[in-house]
Amino acid sequence: MAKIAKGIVRFKSEVYAQKKELFKQLSLGQHPEALFITCSDSRIDPNLLVQTEPGELFICRNAGNIVPPHNNYTGGVTASIEYAVAVLKVKHIIICGHSGCGALEGAMDPESVKDLPHVSQWLSYSKAALQIVEERAPNASREEKLQMLVKENVLLQLQHIRTHPHVAAKSATGKIELHAWAYDIGQGDVEAYDEKLGRFVPVEEKYHEEAKLFAASQASSCDHT
């Protein structure tokens, strides 16, 4: 706890002091570009991963980066999605899984979470992804299956989020884009699902054109200043 408290002191004296104008703007409201849904795992830091400033991502975290299909039950994930899309009008939704996911390890071994009823029920939203992995690679090693499950689970949750009314409407009218990512903690690599190719590819490959356009706009901005 001492380290955490010390961090607050450092934030106030160093980080806040350097970014005072940014925080003043943020105190007036938020306009994030993306809803970033990822795992609660302590090893994941969305802002560090994508190098964003406060206010640029609306972050929703839970065990296994799960999105329950839409229903009449009001849960935190459902409410966060609705608010991000309908009120904040985010233009992108990113669902990001990660290597070595403990939640998905639990999904692979139901006995390990049998005494955790809420966890067991939550992980049931990944069951279809697990069955896909078992169907495709019944003889793969446990480690190989987990690697596959990380990606299949992200794709499954992307299907789930499309059942949410506001997401379905904005997606149908091209006002929002959906992205499936898989992050390798040990390697520092992120792959994104390419629907045209039907597989995950490095983000550098998936967003090559967007990166070029962004770099050009930044250069133009510098020229005018």
Image (cartoon, grey):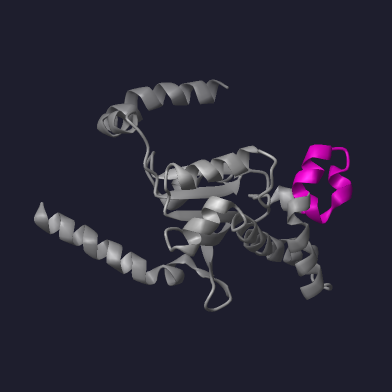
Residue 77, how many percent across, how many down?
61, 42
- Compared to 120, does 148 lie above or below? below
Residue 75, how many percent across, how many down?
66, 38
Which of the 4 image quarters holds residue 186? bottom right
Q: Which residue is most to the left? A: 224
Q: Is residue 119 magenta?
A: yes
Predominant SS of the magenta segment: helix
Q: Nearer the viewer, residue 78 or 194?
A: 78
Q: Is residue 218 left or right of residue 81?
A: left
- Compared to 85, does 214 lie above or below? below
Q: Is residue 119 left or right of residue 223?
A: right
Residue 171, how many percent across, how many down?
49, 61
Q: Which residue appears at 44% of the width and 45% of the height?
A: 57
Residue 69, how many percent across, how many down?
68, 52
Quarter holding the N terminus is top right
Q: Nearer the viewer, residue 188 or 191?
A: 191
Which of the 4 image quarters holds residue 32? top left
Q: Is residue 31 left or right of residue 150?
A: left
Q: Is residue 177 magenta?
A: no
- Compared to 74, does 11 lie above or below? above
Is residue 177 in sight in this rendering?
no
Magenta span of residues: 105-123
Is residue 68 in sight in this rendering?
yes
Q: Which residue appears at 75% of the width and 65% of the height?
A: 145
